[in-house]
């Protein structure tokens, strides 16, 4: 089964904030491209195996729907 990956407005806003921060810190474009490339590869892979990350109990209770959390670091 294949699932659809949706990007929330908060996710996009957080990405924009992070990109601005990296640019202001003088991080090279190649490092930024690599970081974002790996992040989006992880996110897009959720369409095949979305339940591989643990349920975030706090967010699940707060939103009333199951929320899973993936920690990402490069």
Image (spheres, grey):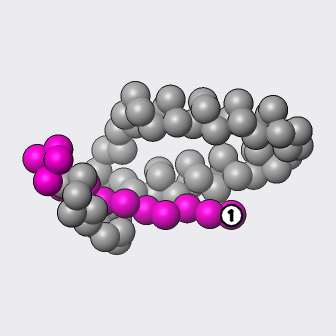
Residue 35, compared with residue 21, is above or below; it is below
- Please give the name of the residue rendered at 36% of the width and 44% of the height, measured from the top-left corner: 5
The residue furthest left is 64
On the image, which quarter does residue 51 sit in? bottom left
Instruction: Examine the residues drawn in magenta and state their main secondary structure.
Output: loop
Instruction: Tell me the element at label 1.
Output: loop
Residue 13, compared with residue 11, is above or below; it is above
Closest to the observer, 35 or 23: 23
Residue position marked by numbered label 1 in the rendering: 74
Q: Position of residue 71 (x, y in %)?
A: 49, 63
**27 relative to 35 in the view: left or right:** right
One can see residue 65 in this view: no
Residue 40, compared with residue 50, is above or below; it is above
Residue 15, compared with residue 60, is above or below; it is above
- Highlighted range, magenta: 61-74
On the image, which quarter does residue 68 sit in? bottom left
One can see residue 15 in this view: yes
Query: Is residue 72 rendered magenta in the image?
Result: yes
Which quadrant, please, contains the C terminus? bottom right
Q: Position of residue 41 (x, y in %)?
A: 56, 54
| Marker count (numbered) | 1
- Please give the name of the residue rendered at 45% of the width and 37% of the height, measured from the top-left corner: 11
- Please give the name of the residue rendered at 17% of the width and 47% of the height, measured from the top-left corner: 62
Q: Position of residue 1 (x, y in %)?
A: 25, 59
Q: Position of residue 52 (x, y in %)?
A: 34, 71
Give the crowd class for mark 1: few <14, some 14-19, many >=20 residues within 10 Å.
few
Query: Is residue 48 rendered magenta in the image?
Result: no
Closest to the observer, 34 or 14: 14
- Please give the name of the residue rendered at 35% of the width and 69% of the height, measured from the top-left corner: 53
């Amino acid at each position: 089964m294949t699932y659809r990956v949706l990007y929330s407005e908060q996710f996009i806003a957080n990405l924009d904030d992070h990109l601005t921060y990296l640019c202001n810190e003088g991080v090279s474009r190649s490092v930024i491209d690599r970081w974002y490339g790996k992040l989006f590869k992880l996110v897009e892979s959720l369409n095949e195996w979305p339940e591989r990350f643990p349920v975030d109990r706090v967010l699940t209770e707060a939103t009333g729907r199951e929320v899973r959390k993936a920690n990402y670091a490069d």
